[in-house]
Amino acid sequence: MSTAPIRRLISPISVRRLGSGLSPTRTAISTHIRQQQHQQPARTLSTTLAPRNVTINTMPFTTPSSDPPQHSMQYFPSMTTALPSESGEFRRVLWTGLYSQVVLMTIPVGGDIGEEIHTVDQALTFTSGIGLAQVGGKEQEIRAGDMVVVPAGTKHQFLNKGPTPLMLYTVYSPAEHKPTTVHKTKEDGDREEEAGIDEPPAWSQRSKRQNEDEGWVKAG
């Protein structure tokens, strides 16, 4: 009998209560397990314990810079195949560019983002959970793997309707938040917004022509 290591892929699943039974639904939980003498998490991601004793991979965070971005790759592993938030933070900015911004969000059970209107475009990709999108007067159930685009100037709200946190990453274009923003709770975010301290930097609001004239970007 062969004793070679076995690599097993656990497909993304979660459970939703239906009466007294359990039914699998799709989420972004994905775990790579190599069965040798002990289990090792895939890649270099840390490991945490999710509800119902499911082991998941989580993303290690680095402190983003407040300066304009360098001309280099920004790599975020397992953004769509693993729950990326280690601490359940409501909002964490991952990266801010001249024309866009990447932000992680975790909406707790029973929570919501809050009804709002942005002056920038927003694209939200959901990686875990079940929710309800209310955008421009229309409603849509959302699940892991779904994407919703909110055009600038459109009233919107996202609510968690499932038994687990609703997790997503969103891309603003241009930036909407301070490059170093981390909000533990929605209330933290509301306070900073009201105080005017969670504002995007001036360099992220310049026009394409301004950036070209000032030498920030050069076509070639």
Image: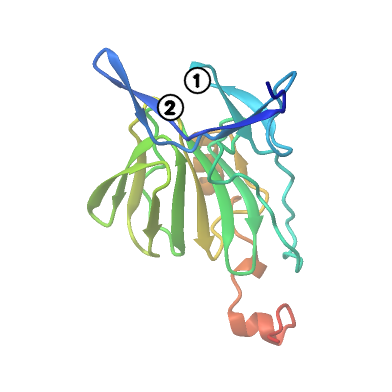
Q: Are marks 1 and 2 in contact (CB under 8 Å)?
A: yes
Picture residue at 48% right of the left edge, 17% below the top = 52
Name the residue beneath numbered marker 1. 51
Helix, strand or loop under label 1 = helix
116 vs 5: above or below: below
Instruction: Give SS at disc 2.
Output: loop
Please say if 90 is above or below 34.
below
Amino acid type, mark 2:
Thr
Circle 1 packing at 10 Å, graded few (<14), some (14-19), many (20+), is few
Query: Where the N terminus falls, by quadrant?
Result: top right
Q: Give the numbered dot on residue 164.
A: 2
Please tell me the numbered disc located at residue 60.
Answer: none
Q: Residue at x 62, y 54 (%)?
A: 178
Give amino acid for label 1.
Pro
Q: Residue furthest front?
A: 1
In the foreground, 114 or 19 = 19
Number of other residues with Cα within 10 Å of mark 2, as a class: few under 14, some 14 to 19, many 20 or more: some
**Residue at (46%, 64%) from the top-left corner?**
120
Residue 220: x and y, percent? 71, 87
Residue 172 appears in view: yes
Q: Residue furthest top?
A: 20
Q: Where's residue 15, x and y in %?
A: 38, 24
**Residue 105 picture location, percent across and down:** 52, 42
